[in-house]
Image (cartoon, rainbow, N blue to C red):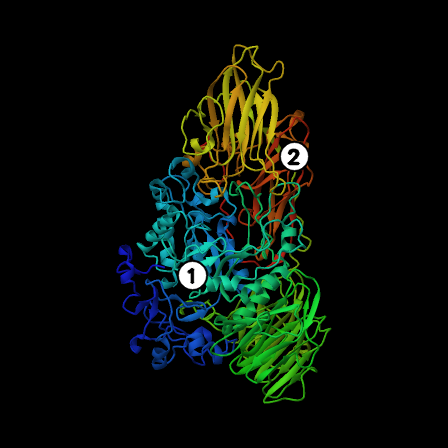
Amino acid sequence: MRLYTYGNAGNTTPLPDSERGINALGSAKNGKAILEAVDPKLLQSDMLPLSDTASSRFPKRHGPSWALFVILSVLCVMVSSVRRSNFFSPASHLDFSRADPAVDTLAGMGFTGNGRTNDVLWDKYSLIIKGQRVFIHSGEFHTFRLPVPGLWLDILQKVKAAGFNAISVYSHMVLINPSPGVVDFDDYRALEPLYEAAKQTGIWIVLRPGPYINAETTAGGIAHWITSEVAGELRTNATDWHAAWQDYVQGVITETAPYQLTEGGPVIAIQIDNEYSQEPDTHAEYFQQLETVYLNSSIVVPLTANDPGENRAWINGTGAVNIYGMDSYPQGFDCSNPDVWRPLTTNYYSYHESVDPDQPWYFPEFQGGSFDAWGPMAPGYDQCRILTGADFENVFNLNLLASNAKLINYYMIYGGTSWGALPFPGVYTSYDYGSAIAENRELTVKYPELKRQGLFLRSSPDFYKTDWVGNSTGGIVSVSDPAAFVTLLRNPDSAASFYIARQGNSTTTDVTTFKLNVTTSAGNFEVPRFTSGITLAGRQSKIIVTDYSFGLSSKVLYSTAQVLFAGQIGGRDILFLYGDPTSESEASLTLNGTPRIQWAGVSSVSSNGITPVTFLPGIQGLVTIWDSSEQLVLYSDADTAGTFWSPEIPANDSVEFANYWQFGTNSSILVGGPYLVRNATITGSTLAIRGDLKDSVQLTVIAPDNVKTVTWNGVPISDDAAAVSNLTTQGGFVAQVKPSSTLLGFAPPALTNWRYADSLPEISSGFSDANWTLADHTTTNIPFKPYYGDGRVLYGCDYEYCENIVLWRGHFNATENTQSVNLSINGGEAFAATVWVNDVFLNTSYGNSTNNKHILEETDDKFHFPPGSLLYDQENVITILQDNMGLNESGSVIDEERSPRGVRGFMLNTGEFGEWKVQGKIGGYTNYPDKVRGVLNEGGLYGERMGWHLPGFDTSSWALRDLSEGLPGTAAGVGFFVTTFNLSIPDGFDVPMSFTFDDFSQPYRSQLYVNGWMMGKRVSNLGPQYQFPVHQGILDYNGINTVAVALWAMEPTTVTPTLQLTVEGVYEGGVGGIETNNPPWSPEGRP
């Protein structure tokens, strides 16, 4: 780790080891920045003051920018407040609300920083953000895979609703830096709207700009122009590579600097490149060069790295970063057998302790799903959602918690769409990833488990600082059945303990019931005490808590039931427990006040103020355990718990970080029933809840008791007094809510009245390629050289044609001895190339993938000329229609990103070729006309070059021909089919829709364009994808939509694709205000 002096941000220079320090406020010991005591006058309040005022009346915070030394306090309001007694204990949670103790507390605490800001610090436990100890609970989201900026808020609200507080985000160099000297942060390439949406939602961001990002995207995100124009080895200290990434990184800095945490923004860290080895030295020096650029800028937040495995990379030495992290994908990336698990990793904790014990344990990427590959044996994302489903999340995520990790990012929480030429060859258009949020933005069966974990973590600040004490194999933890494996974590200040239990054999589906010896403030004893045991129902983990506080003054001595929510609402301490309906559990807790509702399982005997409560099998739905003026304790089965939400009540806009938990607010409510709760606000006595409905549900609300009116999406709803009386006598609200009937029975329009035109005039005898690019290079920076030919290099990227379909035309004179041509064609995994001589079809070369097996990314075939196909002693033309499936990612071969897409060998059996011409997308990567959709949207098909896929192109003169009829005359070739349809969907509805082809294997490829955007590539002979979600914003919900299909028949046979618009769901709600940005056809820049 290196620390830096800084005056103004532009003049930052590295300090030698002998001079390392942490500016005037600290000193360095053993290479770490250690905070020292400071003048108490500097410890001004920078957090919420303790008061009885409502959250909306908090004053704006003040204080110096280095806000570690801030006063941390809590709002005592009539909404949920994280318990003061533990959350704000000085050593555990850095309560600096009293100046004198704060000085004593700071001295010797050993927090580490990067020497540039004290707003983000850390110790061996966790991050310290603006003086608050924080557990980073994050999900990966790539905005470029959802090219509708207005919908980014939808994803962030769904992330926040799951109890998460952060996202991790890649930015994409190919899109942002499409050609030398061009940096474009407009439209969906922008970072600013993401940062603004994060501030609005209350989500932190770890930015991961690369330049290399991997992400199953073309060239791993490296700008395509670099792969051919830069000679030096990529991702090293090579001089020309160093020069090539400067503009992009400087652009990222310019966009991000005003949105750092220190400026009131959401960005708390920036990752350097992605999953890279620190050896050889050229790698390390490249990292150091990247870091130097950030350090010589106004970026002050920490720099991080993600080690792809247990490689000890970037912790020390040249290129070492501030915060080390390690990625882990324990189930791998083949979902073919979704019920078969690999064992979980058991050495996370010991590895971290051996390599980086003084820093918090960080997982920049932990498996949240899996990508899926091309091929008929590919399982599809539904299988990935089973392999990494709720059971996996429960067992494997809690195993991370048991390793004492405090920064966790799940890759992916929303995958999205690899539209256009975004994907690398190993994946198809959908990047659903089997995530908790599906590609079409619907919540999946995985989401409730993530939410149960998220709300527990948000409710449990004692968990943010824990020591790993031991486990049941080392004698520290004692269990009655060795089939159970239990790890103990304990907060060293509050003594709150967390026993994380799983099966010793993580793959077993057996049921294990055991008892556990626990250490508590009331002594050591075995739990459960009154029921038969703790049950692990097959692939399951549980957290047994002891000395766990909830609200301001209540305590759980122990609980074998799981905690969903703990906090305070309306002046009452609230606890929400849940368990399996098929097994029993119990808790012992303080029950205060006179009960107005009391569960039958509450014992009539208390000891030292602690009352046992038993939960027998068979409990379904929500039950009230204890309801008094001081407390409310609830219990439900796990499924019911998964239907509850806890939206935070933000402070008013004058409060910095008003929407951030622990910072602008510590207040929330409970809402049960709806498909989604996006947010909630309280104004006076009115609680306004916003969310989405799919079906009629019972809305259950626990709110401050001064709330008299509840609105759902702005509409007041009537209380069911009888139902409320069974829930609570204070602050409860129950009502039936149902979606509007406006779209009841909504059916999408049929796709009819297709217009057709031929899109392969290049094989016609009169076609002229005079305006095409002459392919006459004899050298290339691409390290994979041609196999044979006459020395000319026929690689698309060398001529600015890196993306999508590229056409090649080779001219030659024929004699009677000319009989065949050999062609080696490289298009990447699952590609195809069809070859004609003059207007005669020769054959198609097929690349291959069978679920990432039997991969064939280039072919070497001999094509025989049929009788009558050649013009003797005249010019003849070979036409190659080649699909480019994207450039490879980094691999075991150096510079694999510089994939040699094109023709690697060409040879007639006799004679030589004359000119070779090449044509890709119009304008190449320098002068492509569609700057909104960007460099990856189009390819070189004639129809694309002419703009036939764009809205507004006049097809009235085209022939009427249904898509299902295929191409005329059963010919191999390419045709464009275009139609329009109208949508009329009112505001206030979110209607996920897809374009769905038939699921039959036929020898065709097709490209789907919706309002000009290439939203899908269908490879019918390989699959597996045939359904392509398209979002509002690409779709015009209230207007005419244009859909185009470029149909490539790869054999001279009839292909009969069908296509329909399908609806996955109708949701009343959504974020609203979604704008379309679908520029229409224009002749400018086109032939």
Number of the front mark, 1 or 2: 1
The answer to whether 251 is drawn above or below residue 669 in the figure is: above
**Viewport quadrant of the N terminus:** bottom left
- Identify the residue under disc 2: 963
Q: Picture quarter containing residue 510?
A: bottom right
**Image x and y of residue 850, in percent:** 63, 40
Left-right relation of 667 to 981: left
- Identify the residue under disc 1: 266
Left-right relation of 1021 to 773: right
The answer to whether 1007 is drawn above or below residue 819 in the figure is: below
404 or 119: nearer the viewer: 404
Residue 698 visible in the snapshot: no
Left-right relation of 145 to 110: right
Mark 2, secondary structure of its residue: helix
Q: Picture quarter containing residue 412?
A: bottom right
- Identified by mark 1, the residue type is Pro
Mark 1, secondary structure of its residue: loop
